[in-house]
């Protein structure tokens, strides 16, 4: 199985709500067999004994309670998905259904249901399942505890600030992981960098996409290992997050040696395609989700600029991290001798900044909270990002000033809309306090 196929399987399992409950449903009868063996080999104290009629009533009650609780969890999940997609962004739904606590709760309920039902089938036999009924009580209590924790987190995570923070955490994790991976890929004494124009003959092969889809992830280590093994240079023609059509050029292979017959299939197996973008390696997708939440809040139907300001708080964290990270465009990975082996198109700092700011500035040009928070964020970025990134921040500041001049033309709040404010509106005008 290729790396791309394994990646798709992992994605499918992460997105599914059925896999872990099925594992739990299978584990229930197996656990019942273990407790059956325990009841046959262990003599429990007399105070631990249950009457057969009591055991039957208890297990029947547990089975009914588990079914009802499972239905309630599913109802809460569906409600959460409806609210997340209707209030925030449909693209946020993938992060919602990947919640580990939700899957753990469903799996615990499935274990409890099948375990208790298996014990019911043992009634009337010798010995009476004394240990088993105790284990069933522990399982239903564990399921109830997981449900209460899940329900509490469900309520808290539907707050706009919590949603934006979660997406921001995903984005920051991708940046940190990608930065560490890039540093590990660099050969000793070599640096990852954007190369100048290198004179190379035409590609010996163009690997084309076999099907349509969006690039969800790239197996960078595998591509580098393949290039070194066959003494070729690989140039990706599309970036992570790009949509592809069937037959579109995907990888250009440069070199002199003859390629193996299965080269195209091997290289395609290191590029994972899916129906939509994924947040596994795509920082831009996470930023896209946050921007979607902000501009939906700024729509006339909702008119909630405070939510947009809260999203900007989290966008500032992501942009701050990106602004302190060297972004190579394109990313060039050399081997130990310094020969480039892989060239990948990557978004630049300006690309990320434009994605994060443009639409919020456009739709929030008449919302004084948004313009003031944007101004504060951009001025802070201008001071803190790498020197080569500051010109892009200055350009965004100029665009913001122009948008405010148009949006507040003739308004008494024209001057106020240009004042930077981390809170959007109501923050202290002076923050430099002498002690």
Image (cartoon, helix red, strand yellow):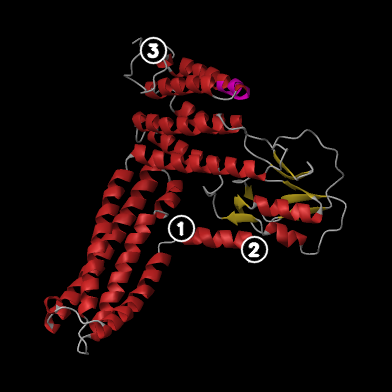
- Measure the C-alpha gap from mark 2 to mark 1: 20 Å
- Magenta region includes residue 392: yes
Residue 168, by quadrant, is top left
Give whichever of discs 2 and 1 has the lower sequence position: 2
Residue 15's label in the rendered image is 1
Residue 432's label in the rendered image is 3
Residue 2's label in the rendered image is 2
Q: Secondary structure at mark 2?
A: loop
Q: Pinpoint residue 208: horizontal percent, then vertical percent.
A: 73, 55
> Which residue corresponds to the image point at 50% horizontal and 61% vertical from the top-left?
12
- Measure the C-alpha gap from mark 2 to mark 3: 57 Å
Label 2: few (<14), some or many (≥20) within 10 Å? Answer: some
Q: Is residue 430 above or below residue 225?
A: above
> Which residue corresponds to the image point at 37% horizontal and 14% vertical from the top-left?
431
Residue 304, by quadrant, is top left
Looking at the figure, which quarter contains the N terminus? bottom right
Report the mark closest to the observer, 3 or 1.
3
Residue 199's label in the rendered image is none
Q: Secondary structure at mark 1?
A: helix
Q: How many marks?
A: 3
> Which residue corresponds to the image point at 53% horizontal and 40% vertical from the top-left?
176
Q: Pinpoint residue 38: horizontal percent, then vertical percent.
A: 28, 80
Q: Secondary structure at mark 3?
A: loop
Give whichever of discs 2 and 3 has the lower sequence position: 2
- Measure the C-alpha gap from mark 3 to mark 1: 48 Å
Label 3: few (<14), some or many (≥20) within 10 Å? Answer: few
Q: Pinpoint residue 96: horizontal percent, then vertical percent.
A: 40, 51
The magenta-colored residue range is: 388-393
Q: Pinpoint residue 358: horizontal percent, then vertical percent.
A: 52, 29
Label 1: few (<14), some or many (≥20) within 10 Å? Answer: some
């Amino acid at each position: 199985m290729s790396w791309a196929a394994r990646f798709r399987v992992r994605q499918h399992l992460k997105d599914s709500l059925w896999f872990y409950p099925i594992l739990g449903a299978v584990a229930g009868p197996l656990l019942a067999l273990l407790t059956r063996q325990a009841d046959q080999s262990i003599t429990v104290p007399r105070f631990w004994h249950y009457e057969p009629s009591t055991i039957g009533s208890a297990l029947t009650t547990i089975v009914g309670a588990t079914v009802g609780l499972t239905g309630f969890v599913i109802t809460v999940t569906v409600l959460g998905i409806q609210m997340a997609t209707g209030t925030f962004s449909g693209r946020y739904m993938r992060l919602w259904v990947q919640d580990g606590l939700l899957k753990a709760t469903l799996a615990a309920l499935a274990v409890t249901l099948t375990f208790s039902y298996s014990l019911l089938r043992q009634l009337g036999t010798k010995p009476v399942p004394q240990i088993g009924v105790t284990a069933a009580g522990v399982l239903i209590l564990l399921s109830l505890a997981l449900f209460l924790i899940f329900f509490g987190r469900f309520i808290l995570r539907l707050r706009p600030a919590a949603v934006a923070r979660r997406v921001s955490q995903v984005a920051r994790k991708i940046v940190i992981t990608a930065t560490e991976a890039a540093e590990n890929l660099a050969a000793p004494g070599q640096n990852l960098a954007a190369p100048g124009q290198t004179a190379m003959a035409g590609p010996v092969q163009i690997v084309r996409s076999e099907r349509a889809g969006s690039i969800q992830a790239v197996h960078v280590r595998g591509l580098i290992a393949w290039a070194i093994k066959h003494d070729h240079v690989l140039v990706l023609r599309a970036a992570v997050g790009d949509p592809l059509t069937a037959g579109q050029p995907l990888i250009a292979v440069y070199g002199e040696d003859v390629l193996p017959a299965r080269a195209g299939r091997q290289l395609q197996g290191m590029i994972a395609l899916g129906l939509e973008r994924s947040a596994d390696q795509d920082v831009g997708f996470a930023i896209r989700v946050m921007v979607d939440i902000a501009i939906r809040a700024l729509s006339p139907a909702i008119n909630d600029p405070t939510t947009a300001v809260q999203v900007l708080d989290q966008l500032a964290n992501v942009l701050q991290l990106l602004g302190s990270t060297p972004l190579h465009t394109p990313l060039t990975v050399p081997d130990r001798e310094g020969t480039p082996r892989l060239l990948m198109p990557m978004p630049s700092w300006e690309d990320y900044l434009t994605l994060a700011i443009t639409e919020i500035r456009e739709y929030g040009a008449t919302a004084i909270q948004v313009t003031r928070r944007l101004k504060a964020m951009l001025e802070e970025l201008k001071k803190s990002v790498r020197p080569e990134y500051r010109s892009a921040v200055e350009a965004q500041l100029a665009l913001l000033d122009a948008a405010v001049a148009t949006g507040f033309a003739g308004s008494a709040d024209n001057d106020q809309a240009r004042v930077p404010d981390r809170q959007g509106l109501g923050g202290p005008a002076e923050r430099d306090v002498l002690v």
